[in-house]
Amino acid sequence: MLNGIPSKDIVFNFFPNPTVSIEESTISKELDFTIINNNQSKELKLNINNFDYSKTYNLEAFSIQGIKVLDLIINNKSTHLNQSDLSQGLYIFTLKQEGKFGVQKVLLR
């Protein structure tokens, strides 16, 4: 008991460093790509800047809740993606190719 309250009802959380962040320098930019959001046409345009035509790429998108909402094999430098299946919100796109990867954030409105 502590001050008349049973101790099993008290929870103490101690966090030596309560701030968690990822510095931009820790995100790999081995695969340089951009995603352009066109709200009017409900389309996303993917451009892979250092594209190698002899390789295939895997594009994944995750909602801010961590749910995978997209998983595609990409074979072109430029690809149009239909965003009508995605609701408004923040998404994390990852592009992977043989151990290399890149990450982009996209806000859909």
Image (cartoon, rainbow, N blue to C red):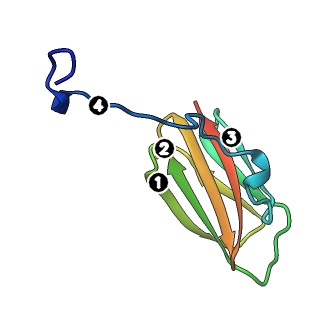
Determine the secondary structure under disc 1: strand
Q: Please name the residue shown 85% across and 61% down the image.
A: 49
As drawn, 4 above or below 100: above
Q: Residue 79 at what x, y percent from top left? A: 70, 60
Q: Which residue is mark 1?
A: 69
Is mark 2 in CB contact (under 8 Å) with mark 4? no
Left or right: where 30 falls relative to 65: right
Measured in 3D between alpha carbons, the distance from the residue under mark 2 to the one under mark 4, in whole angstroms, is 39 Å
Q: Which residue is mark 2?
A: 86
Of callouts 1 and 4, which one flags the residue occurring earlier in the amino acid sequence? 4
Q: Which of the two discs, 2 and 4, labels the residue nearer the N terminus?
A: 4
Q: Earlier in the sequence, mark 1 or mark 2?
A: 1
Q: Earlier in the sequence, mark 1 or mark 3?
A: 3
Which picture quadrant has residue 102? Answer: bottom right
Q: Label 4 belongs to which residue?
A: 11
Q: Nearer the viewer, mark 3 or mark 4?
A: 4
